[in-house]
Image (tube, rainbow, N blue to C red):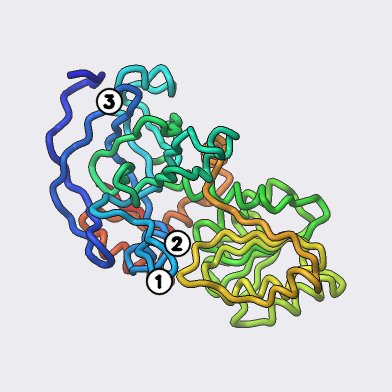
Amino acid sequence: MDYQANEPLPNTMQAIVCHGPEDYRVQEWDVPIPDAGEVVVKVKSVGICASDLKCYQGAPLFWGDDHREGYCQTPVIPGHEFVGEVVALGEGAGEKFGLFIGDMAVSEQIVPCWNCRFCKRGQYWMCQDKHDVYGFRQATFGAMAEYMKFPVGSLNYKVPKSIPAHHAAFIEPLGCSIHAVQRGDILLDDVVVIAGCGPLGLGMVAAARLKNPRLLIAIDLNDDRLETAILCGADLTMNPKKIDVIDEVRKLTDGYGCDVYIEATGYPAAVEQGLHMIRKLGTFVEFSVMREPVTVDWTIIGDTKELNIHGAHLSPYTYPIAIKMLEDGLLPMERIMTHQLPLSDFHKGMDMVADGTQSIKVTLTP
């Protein structure tokens, strides 16, 4: 064999394969073999993301509509939140990434082209030419399988074995959360509102806590998630079903509104809520992957408040920070990683994520 491994890889494996909206099948698939510079891992845990759910349900972003081409290519193995044990290393891969057979490892969710304008400027997360994210593109099959490959051009990191595998699968969403918080440019005297206390929103609360703002507020419709937000570092929580959250935030800020608002719900109503809640000259960070286009009053953004509108995409340069946060126990991971299911229970996992009332983060174990 032309790669390093303790023992030969099997020929086939069990995998979840996406063939189209709501057409995801458990089937036998070829085990990937690493070429030079590539890594193969035995997947230990893989999370189900809200974007996985939206792809599964047929959202236009992934499958296209009259205005855009869909992002998903089929057939493809989904899964971009994962951790695995290194079982094979192509020539030079171990030296490049500091990995050995038996190490736990993770790969950033995007495999950039490294040749486009953005990649050459170090802005690889906005790669123009490929923008291959694991689990959606045929060049980058994901982790909902027994084995997966980190191809040439991937960004790979060793994960301490002190982090349980189902916790390490949270590195990817936590990295995204950290980037969103960094986009907020939070200052010490700021009042910060994070809308949405799903896995990403909770990661944002934990990351924003490290910025030590004057007041950190978490908003969600689910009281259990709000309790978890307190454990992540929120000073105050609010449930829009019970109180007028816009009025409450204004009362807490002498009528001005919050300084920074980070939207992590995925629902259009939270965008409008933020525009009314934020102060003039405030910073609005939009993270969510929306199911459909969102319409708002742009006059608020421009003439009325002159807001700073910042998008947040993926997790550039944040994986080492996320790994360290998990290693240091800065999040209540046993409350966040609520369910671990076998790979064969993929559809049950999707149903749990869609329901959202009984779980926070659902992972699959191949």
Is residue 244 among the parts visible in the rendering? Answer: yes
Residue under label 3: 35
Q: Quadrant of residue 309?
A: bottom right
What distance separates the C-alpha of mark 1 from that of mark 2?
34 Å
Dot 3 amino acid type? Asp
Q: Which of pointers 2 and 3 lies earlier in the amino acid sequence?
A: 3
User: Going 54% across and 41% down the picture, which residue do you hit?
Assistant: 322
Front residue of 170 and 286: 286
Q: Are marks 1 and 2 in contact (CB under 8 Å)?
A: no
Residue under label 2: 360
Front residue of 358 and 147: 147
- Which secondary structure lies at badge 2? loop
Is residue 109 among the parts visible in the rendering? Answer: no
With respect to residue 207, does 67 lie above or below?
below
Dot 1 amino acid type? Asp
Q: Residues within 10 Å of mark 3 (few under 14, many from 20)?
A: some
Specify the label residue 258 is tagged with.
Answer: none
Residue under label 1: 66
With respect to residue 36, does 227 lie above or below?
below
